[in-house]
Structures are given as structure tokens and as C-alpha cells.
Amino acid sequence: AFNANVAAAQQALNAFIVPTPEKAIEAAQAVDAARAAGKPLGKMAGVPIGMKDLFATRGIQTTAASHILEGFKPEYESTVSQKLWDAGAGMLGKLNLDQFAMGSSNETSYFGNVISPWRRNDGGNAALAPGGSSGGSSAAVAARLAPAATGTDTGGSIRQPAAFTGISGIKPTYGRCSRWGVVAFASSLDQAGPMARDVRDCAIMLEAMAGFDPKDSTSLDLPVPAWEAGLSGDLKGKKVGIPREYRLDGMDEEVAKSWDQGIAWLKDAGAEIVEISLPHTKYALPTYYIIAPAEASSNLARYDGVRYGLRDLPDGAGLQDMYAATRAAGFGPEVKRRILIGTYVLSAGFYDAYYTQAQKVRALISRDFKEAWAHCDVILAPTTPSASFALGEKSADPLEMYLNDVFSVPASLAGLPAMSVPAGLNSEGLPLGLQIIGKPFDEQGVLNAGLAIE
Ligand code: GLN
């Protein structure tokens, strides 16, 4: 049934770049054989999942949704995908995303927009954004093409698409999941995580994905807790912080209402609600949009027409011409914009004014959270400033698009675990998400608060 669904909905949603149903069948058969032989089964035994096309998969095209990587078949498997296969999961296909994970609507993919399975309740049929950058993942899970999918989150790319499509997704503490074999965007922020129908599925899948990896120098050398076994919707004795600065002037009324509803649900689960302050919140977005492009411009220097995918070698051209032609043809406009911003803020004359300054502000944002943990165990906030929007509505204005990330980037800059869980529909019939941010390494606290909301 999954195969038929993948084929039909692929037409409508464009969630997959490359479907690989034969891989999912192979995994299911291996699980059957293991079961027949009385062998122990893994946490994800037989579960067919979608793999964001940012994870290197051996022998299977891995593109980051960019023309520059078209045709690239890695010789190696990412640590996270390998762990999922070792746990018994099978791959339904490589999922579409924003090019190099840069975007909030899945409109920057070289392989076309992903379309959300959701529609407004106004009787119209406007195609809506599934969120980004993990838009193929969110659309596939929301449309029930896959019970779960991998995502990556640099500044919100798991949480925002989860919120837009009414599913759950968690970005663990920075370092929980290995970045080895994940196409790099901004290395000090990038973190993989699960996107699934509910909190329990996220807990199960995260257990399979997480763990120390000597091949990633920023990998956390900590045991993986039994998050699923630790799930409890009882929040007695827990304090939930409500950050004053997230209540923006002119905040969407329905978003504010859903936040209040979330507060009420957590109270019902026994939590105590406390107001907290994160005074540097308003600097998080500009800080992120300096640091992320800076790191991206450096990471993307490797796409030179020699080592991977595309090579554009004009007649009689030299090496420099080949670099220029390959990069001009291979990168999309948003990727080029980030490279230009990144090289600008890292250039000799501007480094201190932008990059150094952004690093200092990043430290202040982290300190805000550290001080908040003296007063609360988790933080509750909206995931996004609005519900999903129509494709094309924001793509002409990059700043308008970047504003989507206002609630998700602070936890990214501080490396904290953060989750989005569905919190009902707005008056247009579209999902809204609520975000739970936790202390470093306290995915359990985040998952438990999420369970109390869903
Ligand atoms: N929307 C943000 C950006 O475009 C975050 C992307 C991400 O988390 N990968 O950078």
C-alpha cells in the first residue's frame, strides 16, 4: 500500500526526489527473516521511512536539492542513516528540501516546490508551503506517505515544517546526532532529528538516530537515554517558562490564542507556569543570518566542479573559468545570496563589525537561556509567527521569508533541544505548532511536555 501511495501522491506533492520503495521492501524482508530465525529486532524494525536528501546514502543520488550535486552518488553512508538501517528501518526514498537546506518554504529546491497536503477551508485550492527546509519530510509524513522521516534543523528546519503540516519533530541538543555524512550548511548549528506523526514515534526514532560518533568532532560522548520508556505526560513539579519577549507587537491573534491554549494544557498536566525573560531575543534573527551564511560560504567552497556532481567546462576554459561556470550554473539564487552575505561578513574589512559581533551576541543569547533555567525546566513558545502560506506569497522577498524563523533560531544559536508539536487548527483550518525548548541534554523533558500538549 505504501508503494501505491508513494507513486500517486508523489505526482501531487513532489515530496520525493528519488523514490526507493525497493529498499523499504528489502528491509522488511530482512526483518521477516530475522524474526523467523528468532533474532532480536531493532527499534525501527520494518518501518519504511523517508530520508531527507541531505543525508549521504551509499550508491543513491544525494543532491541537497541542488543542481550542483545532481548525479552525485556517495561512496559512503551518513552515520545517522546507517544507524536507522541498523535499527531495521528501510528507505522509501530521498526527500525533497530547500536547496542546501536554505529556506523556509521548500521553494528553493532545484527539483521544484513541494506542495503541502493541507488546503485552507475556504473552498479554494491554493497550493500551500509545507515549510522548509525539511518540506519533503513534512509533506510526506503529513500525507501519510511515510510514518516518519529524517529532518535536519539549522535554524528551524525540523520545527517550522512540522508546525506547518500538523506533525511532530524534534531537534535534539547540538551534538546528539552525528553530522558525519550530512551535507553541511552551518556546521555550528546543523543538527539532525526525527519528524513523525506523534511524540512517541519521535522518541523511538531519535533513540535510533542519536549517539556518539568519533567521525564527528562535535559529537556528544554521552549514552543515549531510553526516551520512549521515559515518556510521561505528567508534569507535576515541573516549571514551564513563558518568555515575555516572544510576545511580539502585532503578533498573529490566532498564534497568541494557541499559545494560551498550550499554557492551559500544560497547567492541566500539573505544570507550574512562570514568566521568564530572554532579553536578547530580538537580536537572534540578525545574528543567525550572519553566522549561518558565514559558515555556509565556507562549507560550500568545496563545490568546485572537480570533486562532486556538476562540472561546467566551457571550451578552452581554464580552472578559474570552470569554477565560475560550475558554481554559476549549479547554485540556485538563495544559495548564491547566502554565499555573498557570508563572504561579505567574513571579509577583512567587515569581519569584526559583523561576524565577531554576531558571535558575541550569540554568547549573550546562550546566557539568557542559562539564566532562565534557574527559574524553569522547559520553555513554551509558538513555533512560527503564522500558519502556512501560499507558495509564491513570500518567495519574492527574502527578508519576509527570514522572519518566519524568528521563534526557532534562538534555540538553534544556543544548541538547545527543541520540539514542535501540533496544537490544533486556526480559523482557516490550517495547523499551528507549539514549541518546547529544553535544557541541554534534556530531550526527555522536551518530549514529556510535548506529550502533554498533543
Ligand atoms: N529557514 C532557515 C534558513 O533558511 C533555517 C533553515 C534550516 O534550519 N536548515 O536558514
Image (cartoon, helix red, strand yellow):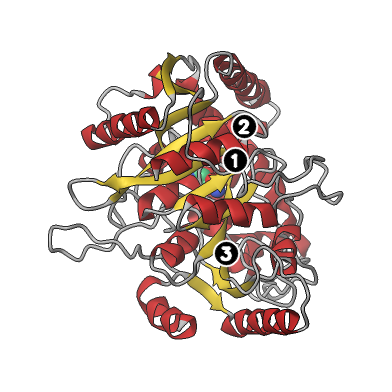
Residue 52, above or below 154: below
- Nearer-the-camera pick, 231 or 138: 231
Q: What's the mark number on residue 293?
A: 1
User: Which of the 4 image quadrants contains residue 258?
Assistant: top left
Residue type pointed to by label 1: Pro
For image coordinates 21% across by 53% down, the residue present is: 429
Q: Is residue 212 visible?
A: yes
Quarter of the picture containing the N terminus is: bottom left
Residue type pointed to by label 2: Val
Q: Are marks 1 and 2 in contact (CB under 8 Å)?
A: yes
Q: What's the mark number on residue 66?
A: 3
Q: What's the CA distance linking mark 2 and mark 3?
A: 24 Å
Q: What's the mark number on residue 262?
A: none
Please state if 272 lies on the left or on the right of 394 as rendered. right
Residue type pointed to by label 3: Ser
The residue indicated by pointer 2 is 345
User: Which of the 4 image quadrants contains residue 443?
Assistant: top right
Q: Are marks 2 and 3 in contact (CB under 8 Å)?
A: no
- Dot 2 surroundings within 10 Å: few (below 14), some, or many (20 or more)? many
Can you give x and y, in whole percent of width and height, for residue 220 in the image?
78, 40
Question: Which dot, 2 or 3, sits closer to the camera?
Answer: 3
- Nearer-the-camera pick, 425 or 341: 425
Residue 73, above or below 454: below
